[in-house]
Image: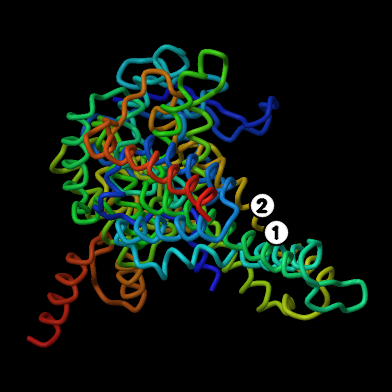
Amino acid sequence: MIKAENVTFSYSDDLSVPVLDNVSITVADGSFVAVLGHNGSGKSTLAKHFNAILLPSGGKVYVFGQDTAKKNALLDVRKKVGMVFQNPDNQIVATVVEEDVAFGLENLGVPSDEMHERVGKALDAVQMSEFAKSAPHNLSGGQKQRVAIAGIIAMRPRCIVLDEPTAMLDPSGRREIMKTIKTLNKDMGITVVLITHYMDEAAQADRVIVMDSGKVCMDDCPKNIFTRREELLALGLDVPQVTELMHRLREKGLRVREDIIYTDECIEELVSLLEEKYD
Amino acid sequence: MIRDITLGQYFPGNSVIHRLDPRIKIIWTFFYIVLLFFVNNFWGFLVYVVFTAIIIRLTKIKPKLIFRGLRPVLFLLLFTVIVNVFMTGGGDVLFKFGFLTVTTEGLKFAGLMAMRLILLVTGTSILTFTTSPIMLTDGIERLLSPLAKIGVPAHAIAMMMTIAIRFIPTILDETDKIMKAQKARGADFESGNIIKRAKAMTPILIPLFISAFRRADELATAMECRCYHGGEGRTRFKQLKIRKLDIISLLFAPLLLAAVVATKYIF
């Protein structure tokens, strides 16, 4: 469990313009939480507090019971909470895929035999085993990002924080990553915190937190969040495309549900609408 | 076009040379370079060329790819040759043009210098082509580790080198992109004299530097996230073990030495 208690943070000593302003949230074990917010809302800054890359200027962050501000807990905290960043190029250290996946394990002092086994399993989990000996710069963006994720899961974290992992990828790369993230969460039981600005991605989480100017302004399940269309638009955010479609259909006077956020639901609704009309 | 630069790039493979212990390969490379500077006649170079050719054959990497590594030093090579041709005195004068004199000795010396440079680059690129950077830095780290006691930051040096090598293709890609972007905005890199062209590089270098710093910052954070905390208590994915193959390879070192020394006395 990750718990932020009244976290305030500012990059300068001046606390009058905080990046994070009295944020308190709890991420339950095994959950899939998406954090939404436009640029500068503090979502990435919050994420960096979850594995002690940044320490709160005020308040506390507890990661599985440990205070992140304690120096001697640092490695343990980072071992439990892995982090994946936006640019896959800037997080790959080695020139061969499997050696890069092993990087974290090398730092933790894992014996070589065990390392080989864990690297193999991690690459399996992200379906990149066939590229174990490849050079990262020859991979596609989505593949590189999956290598970065493998590097984290090889360390067997209990939670993975992904900071806009799909922002630099093409649509097929985005789909690959979303699929991988879901496997991590559903099959491996890893807690996932996904920072994103894609509404469709956020819709796939169990819980959505919306941030604005350093504050948590909404915190609910995706259905409840995306039915608050006007509020989201006012925050410079959006709703998933299907939700927008439903909204426009309603404006045209059609009777469709407004709480639709997934493509499947949308199709069902449209089909039943058409059937109703032509029966 | 900029991607052609292969100096410092690894070609995965499973040849005899690939399988050698990196420490042995580094020691071999040093030996190869040092000995190369004692070679000063045609036969000595012939020995070296044959030796290098055999090694290239053993790596099973296409010779074309290895020679591509020479491209970036082409200018240096030409410069060396020209300077040596005109600056070396002695021997018969072939022709005179103003203050420039070309002598047989000059031509010979320039040829030897060029050979030396080519062999130097080829020999060292064999090391980087057949050794993955992590293995390479592992090797360097192990070789330097006795010096850690007198304060040499062996691990830090090795880590910096790995990262530098890792980012060569990334930064090259980026340079290419920036060049195209600036060209699209009307920048002209091809015309004008050297000074004008050097000045034209500014709009490439500044964005490149800014992005390199940004990358460095992000990479440092990503490394911290993966529990990087220096060399203390670190284990290795690939263990280094001196095997029979390595010992056998070392046996060829005195052979090469003997052959080179022999050419000095026989011819």
Mark 2–mark 1 CB contact (< 8 Å): yes
Looking at the image, the residue that sits furthest to the right is B98
Looking at the image, the residue that sits furthest to the bottom is A278
Residue lying at 57% horizontally and 28% vertically, measured from the top left = A9
**Chain of the residue on which disc 2 is drawn:** B
Looking at the image, the residue that sits furthest to the left is A279
Res B138 quadrant in image: top left
Instruction: Indicate left or right for A229 with A221 as reference.
Output: right
**Chain of the residue on which disc 1 is drawn:** B
In front of the other: B171 or A193: B171
Number of marks present in the image shown: 2
Name the residue that disc number 2 marks. Answer: B209
Name the residue that disc number 1 marks. Answer: B205
Q: Position of residue B186 (x, y in %)?
A: 73, 79
Q: Position of residue A243 (x, y in %)?
A: 31, 65
- Judge the density around disc 2: few (<14), some (14-19), many (≥20) Cα neighbours within 10 Å: few
Q: Could you say whether the residue bearing mark 2 is in a helix, strand or loop? A: helix
Say if B126 sits above or below B190 in the image: above
Looking at the rendered structure, the kind of residue marked 2 is: Phe
